[in-house]
Image (spheres, rainbow, N blue to C red):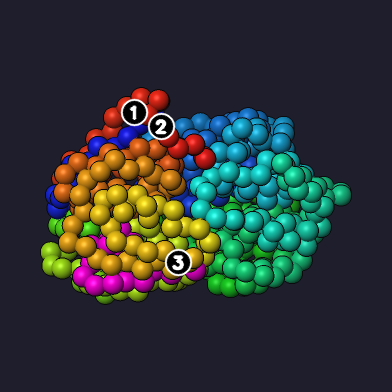
Amino acid sequence: MNQYIINGHRPLFGEITISGAKNAAVAIIPAALMVDGVCRIENIPQISDVTLLFSILEGLGARVRVLNQHAVEIDSRQVHSTKPQFDLVRQIRASYYLIGALLGRFGEATVAMPGGCDFGVRPIDQHIKGFTALGAKVEEGNFVHAKVEGGRLTGASVYMDVVSVGATMNVMMAAALAKGTTTIENAAKEPHIVDLANFLNFMGADIKGAGTDSIKIRGVDRLTGGTYSIIPDQIEAGTYMAAVAAAGGQLLIKNVIPKHMDCISAKLMEMGVYVEELDDALLVRRSGELQRVNVKTLPYPGFPTDMQPQIVAVLSLAHGTSMVTEGVWSNRFRYVDELKRLGAHIQVDGRVAVVEGVDHFRGAPIQACDLRAGAALVVAALAAEGTTEISHVQYIERGYEDLVGKLRAVGADIRLVDLPEHRSTMKDIG
């Protein structure tokens, strides 16, 4: 076990370069199983979720060759199994993308129910509805077993009862190799959905409308390979924006798509943070007092649920009382007790958090309970007076490449240290 030791209350100055998008990479890597050839994927983030997916693909028979720090070559021509290893699948939520990829190419998939961060019930009923519409028979238990007679899915019209990013991407993958045309209505519109569609199209698929609420997929016989570069990570960029908002200073955040950041930039600017949009970068500065705002998380282009914990950490230091409403997940405020240990004044009632701003945080031992909650604790610790010890940082490393190195380079006093196993008190939930 490791922990972060952060001596806070230091403004951040300098430049940070954003890595490839975690939420895109964890779908694109399973999608490589659909390619009957070699695909080269660039701008891969160096995070534990990606490493885990490489192991899963290799266990299925794919050849994974790491070319450099951020590029990999995947050859899935020798894939011999449609049942990925149980203990690996259980460690990552995005493992459900293996169902769509394997079902689309091989007509069958047996995948353990996914794991990942625990912040509420996250059913896969919309995924299953889509697979069933395409002609698969699906059985659920400890595993999801999906199979189509004849070995190939058939295009159909799929209407999502709720806007679901995972289901949109999963059904889109499966439909890429189906017979005929599939239309996904009420589709999610997040940037990583567009990125997955672009990847599949580069490999030979025929997908139109990604980024709108209606996606049309004309099935093709095979995907043949190619080269693709993953988009920058919207949430990583937003996290560093939140960090400078909380701690003060000025950061040039490079390798971003500013349009993807509009929903985050707008709220920070409303709080009094200066945000300047450049070609592929954002200049973010905070020197004055933060002001209260109300935030509600919504599907894209609304404020992202994956930025909700970080914005709560910042609002805890704002003047006045803010309300944050979680519009996507049912139980995403589990981290609030940890912020309270630093001095935050937050009351949670169901999906609403009432955040009363305080003058300052004071360092204390705290622990991450999931990926984005852990990032929020780092944001808070950077602003806190004194020393903060954050344990269970394996959650954070699932989604942030070299967080310690990037923050140290802009003036943060943060280091990664070993934590003796006997000091761990929270069960690892993956």
Rendered position, 94 above or below 306:
above
Query: Is residue 80 covered in magenta?
Result: no
Residue identified by numbered label 1: 419
Residue identified by numbered label 2: 424
Tell me whether the residue at label 3 lies in contact with that at label 1, contact meaning CB atoms closer than 8 angstroms: no
Tell me whether the residue at label 1 lies in contact with that at label 2, contact meaning CB atoms closer than 8 angstroms: yes
Q: Residue sitting at 13 percent across and 67 percent down? A: 288
| Image quadrant where one finds the N terminus | top left
Q: Is residue 373 visible?
A: yes
Q: Secondary structure at mark 1?
A: loop
Q: Amino acid at mark 1?
A: Leu
Label 2, residues with CA under 10 Å away: few <14, some 14-19, many ≥20: some
The front one of 85 and 386 is 386
Q: Earlier in the sequence, mark 1 or mark 2?
A: 1
Q: Please tell me the numbered disc located at residue 349.
A: 3
Tell me the distance, in whole angstroms, between the alpha carbons under discs 1 and 2. Answer: 8 Å
Q: Residue sitting at 56 percent across and 61 percent down? A: 165
Query: Image check: 327 left or right of 235?
Result: right
Rendered position, 127 above or below 25:
below
Q: Earlier in the sequence, mark 3 or mark 1?
A: 3
User: How far from the left and from the top, in percent, is residue 114?
Assistant: 62, 45
